[in-house]
Amino acid sequence: AQSVAQPEDQVNVAEGNPLTVKCTYSVSGNPYLFWYVQYPNRGLQFLLKYITGDNLVKGSYGFEAEFNKSQTSFHLKKPSALVSDSALYFCAVRDITTGGFKTIFGAGTRLFVKA
Amino acid sequence: GAVVSQHPSRVICKSGTSVKIECRSLDFQATTMFWYRQFPKQSLMLMATSNEGSKATYEQGVEKDKFLINHASLTLSTLTVTSAHPEDSSFYICSARDSTSGGWTGELFFGEGSRLTVL
């Protein structure tokens, strides 16, 4: 079965420091991986995706993610965190086993960036 | 970028009444939309897949007679919570797949969510 796991409920980082939000995946076939961000009482916003190609994917707001096939990971990173990055982050995988339209979301990781 | 409008953002209703939530894709066609429910501090739970011009596909455990979904056009899907009860209080979010052109790679565009409170 397709799945993603976010092992950390919460990540705390100081403003200006690099941040990493972890995600591991389990899929059959080639993975279609995504990161979304959710601010309080809002919908989700698409940050970036990995379909194929370069393992380092760049996205919105200075975020990037590194696809690592051997470790089945897709960690979200940013070189220098901002207080405004504080939000809930979801890793997701496209479920290709059910016709390809469903998306499976991880449990979410809450990022706190302290000034 | 693609914009999805969801309305209302907040709604309070009395127990036993019905509430309709709209999800519109503003600048793209969406033959497929998705409805989620999100509990506090939890992930999104997929309720159903809304297909333009056909019946919605509900996830296991979701009552189709209680959560009515209509997707009558390429840009509009509606979720109606019928005979609402306090346990239906939740944050409901819709998302849409851009089907304007081929080659969809999986990204979704989300509405801003609707917070339903049933008294």
Image (cartoon, coloured by chain):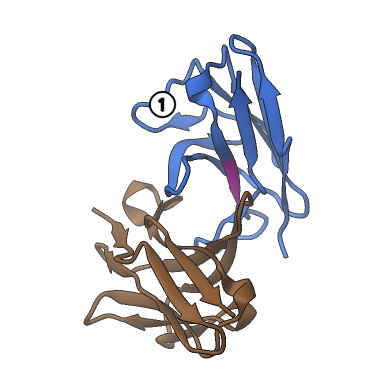
Q: Residue at x 23, y 79 (%)?
A: A71
User: Is residue B102 left or right of A103 when viewed as pictured?
Assistant: right
Q: Main secondary structure of the magenta part?
A: strand
Label 1 resides on the chain identified as B
In the displayed orientation, state which residue is furthest to the right.
Answer: B26
Chain B: colour as depicted: blue
Q: Residue at x 51, y 90 (%)?
A: A79
Above or below for B5 versus A18? above
In the displayed orientation, state which residue is furthest to the front.
Answer: A115
Residue A25 image position (x, y, % from top left)? 29, 66
Above or below for B24 versus B64? below
Q: Mark 1 is on which residue type?
A: Val
Magenta segment includes A36: no
Q: Which residues are magenta?
A: B93-97
Above or below for A92 versus B5? below
Q: Regarding mark 1 in the picture, which secondary structure is present there?
A: loop
Q: Which residue is mark 1?
A: B62
Residue A17 image position (x, y, % from top left)? 50, 89
Please rate how many residues cluster around mark 1, counting C-alpha atoms within 10 Å: few if below 14, some from 14 to 19, many from 20. few
Chain A: colour as depicted: brown
User: Is residue B34 left or right of B98 when viewed as pictured?
Assistant: left
